[in-house]
Amino acid sequence: MWSGPRNLSTAMMYAFAQRSDCEVWDEPFYAAYLAKTGLSHPMGEDIMANGDTDAEVVIEKCLSVGPQGRPVFYQKHMTQHMIPEFRRDWILQQTNVFLIRHPARVLASYAVKRENPTLRDIGFEQQMELINLVTSETGRSPLIVDSADIRQDPASMLQKICAAVDIPFEEKMLSWPQGGNTQDGVWAPHWYGAVWNSSGFAGPESELPPVAPELADVYQNAKRLYDQMAEQKTAL
């Protein structure tokens, strides 16, 4: 599952973590991304100390079964972590789903947790690149879903997503215990407050939030990319 930050990605991971046949991995490349870029992120030292900082090690693990050996291995990937220094050919061996969200909502949420995000920080460019990679190499468009559609009707959308990737839907995916998941990354205390307090998907999205003037350029560039991806959204 590929998305940018603040994109319903953690809630989706929690949903899949409830399945009887599934184990999840939270942002496999985060430590390697920080180690390679030198970027300053909240809890960055802890993230690198507790994760794999070698991208090749991460790739090898992504292509294997999960540690518990369950048949479904759900990997919550952040598109911004796929920097040019990390090879991408391994992605073609995966079942890929792309989760998109309107950039006004992404920016409003992200800026609360980390100031002055750039276009590269929120992953829209990288997500478009990965969609284009999968499309060009496989000859068909990958599964693209909008978080707003999931929020509008979680049960229907999760049933359709499961059908599209050829796994059975389980009703237990629609709710989870409050307080987080044992597979959360070490960064969860900073980023996951809202979903920790939840026990299921929030209701339909409200009106779009305003975009801060200083983020207008980032928003415009992200919106252009979002519109392109939304045009390719899979009809489920």
Image (spheres, rainbow, N blue to C red):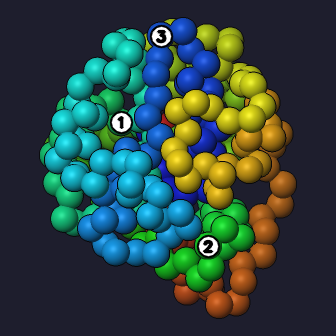
Q: Which of the pair 69/106 is nearer the observer?
A: 69
The residue that label 1 is drawn on is 96
| Number of residues whose C-alpha sits closer than 10 Å to that of mark 2, classed few (under 14), some (14–19) or many (20 or more) | some
**Which residue is identified by label 3?**
21
Report how far apart the C-alphas of labels 1 and 2 lie in the structure.
Answer: 28 Å
Secondary structure of the residue carrying tag 2 is loop
- Please name the residue shown 76% across and 48% down the image: 194
For label 1, the SS is: loop
Instruction: Kindly tell me whether residue 90 is visible in this rendering.
Output: yes
Q: Which residue is mark 2?
A: 114
Instruction: Determine the residue positioned at 61% across, 49% down.
Output: 188
Q: Amino acid at mark 2?
A: Arg
Q: Residue at x 83, y 60 (%)?
A: 207
Q: Residue furthest bottom?
A: 214
Quadrant (top left, top right, bottom left, bottom right) of the N terminus: top left
Question: What x and y, as percent, mark residue 195?
Answer: 72, 43
Query: Which of label 1 and label 2 is nearer to you?
Result: 2
Q: Badge 3 local density, few (<14 within 10 Å), some, or many (20+)?
A: some
Residue 230 appears in the rendering: no
Amino acid of disc 3? Asp
